[in-house]
Amino acid sequence: MWIADQWKDYEIIDTSNGEKLERWGNYLLVRPDPQVIWNTPKTHKGWKKKNGHYHRSKKGGGEWEFFDLPQQWTIQYKNLTFNLKPFSFKHTGLFPEQAANWDWFSEKIRNAGRPVKVLNLFAYTGGATLAAAAAGASVTHVDASKGMVGWAKENARSSGLSDAPIRWIVDDCVKFVEREIRRGNHYDAIIMDPPSYGRGPKGEIWKIEEAIHPLIKLCVKLLSDKPLFFLVNSYTTGLAPAVLTYMLATELKSYEGTVDSQEVGLPVSSNGLALPCGASGRWEAR
Ligand SMILES: C[S@@+](CC[C@H](N)C(=O)[O-])C[C@H]1O[C@@H](n2cnc3c(N)ncnc32)[C@H](O)[C@@H]1O
């Protein structure tokens, strides 16, 4: 498992009974997590001192209960600053396990010894975009939601990256990739972080199991002659790491490179175990 263990402002303190107790900077949140199927005793005092608790509803969805939580605050990861606002569904605006991937590709970009053009699809609030830009890449950031792109720009400002070479695009990822192929544009690296289910700006339906392989195939047409890496994340438990390896190895076979896929996870400080948070597939040039 690739574990994001370099955080100072974030930690999972404990997990029990379908929930995780997390520290986001100075604030404690309790949020649901379907992976937490065990019912260990909630002995850590943080369970009682939480600042926010997302309660699942039996009808689907749920709602937040807040105890002394600001509307917005920031946390740092190395040289990046993220604005957090836990209002949309159970999310805070950041998937901290992705830091394991940010570190992996940032080193590749820094050591490439040439300009690197990155395409970040389903780019959400910009974690991967900012990490790639801070490492020296120029980045095209694509997300269907105008609000998310606005939030990502806010994170770029907070991280001192307002003037970094980032192209912000509100579009459906499949449509954007098809358009880029027609325009003859190329990228040295591709990152995609698709949801299990999503919609483009015009209601285009995205279902990961049906759409991911065709999208990887299309994206290969956008690669430059010397691609650096290709990263695919999946939060869907149905897409096992070996499935990611299979797709990447099949579609990138004409390039000199290697593929490795693993679960990604976060350390749990109360017991030293790791909580699984999905999987990533990484192709890298040899
Ligand atoms: C980071 S991903 C996955 C987040 C989360 N783990 C989940 O499964 O919902 C979600 C992002 O993809 C975007 N998105 C969903 N469908 C899209 C589409 N067809 N084209 C572009 N972006 C899309 C959403 O706006 C959102 O910012």
Image: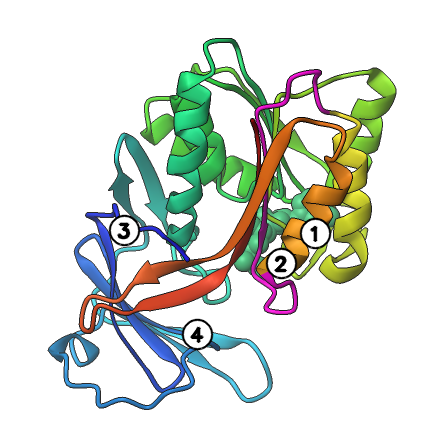
Report the side of 253 relative to 63 (left or right): right
Say which amino acid is labelled 3. Answer: Asp
Q: Secondary structure at mark 4?
A: loop
| Residue shown at 36% from the left, 78% from the top | 19
- Mark 3 and mark 4 in contact? Answer it, CB < 8 Å: no
Spatial CA span between label 1 and label 4: 28 Å
Whichever of callouts 4 and 2 sits on the residue coming sooner in the sequence is 4
The reply to whether the magenta stretch includes residue 226 is: yes
Say which amino acid is labelled 4. Answer: Asp
Say which amino acid is labelled 1. Answer: Tyr
Whichever of callouts 3 and 2 sits on the residue coming sooner in the sequence is 3
Q: Which residue carries the number 1 mark?
A: 246
The reply to whether the magenta stretch includes residue 101 is: no
Q: Which residue carries the number 2 mark?
A: 242
Q: Secondary structure at mark 1?
A: helix
| Residue shown at 71% from the left, 24% from the top | 223
Query: Of the residues tagged 4 and 2, which is closer to the observer?
Result: 2
- In magenta, the rendered stretch is 223-240
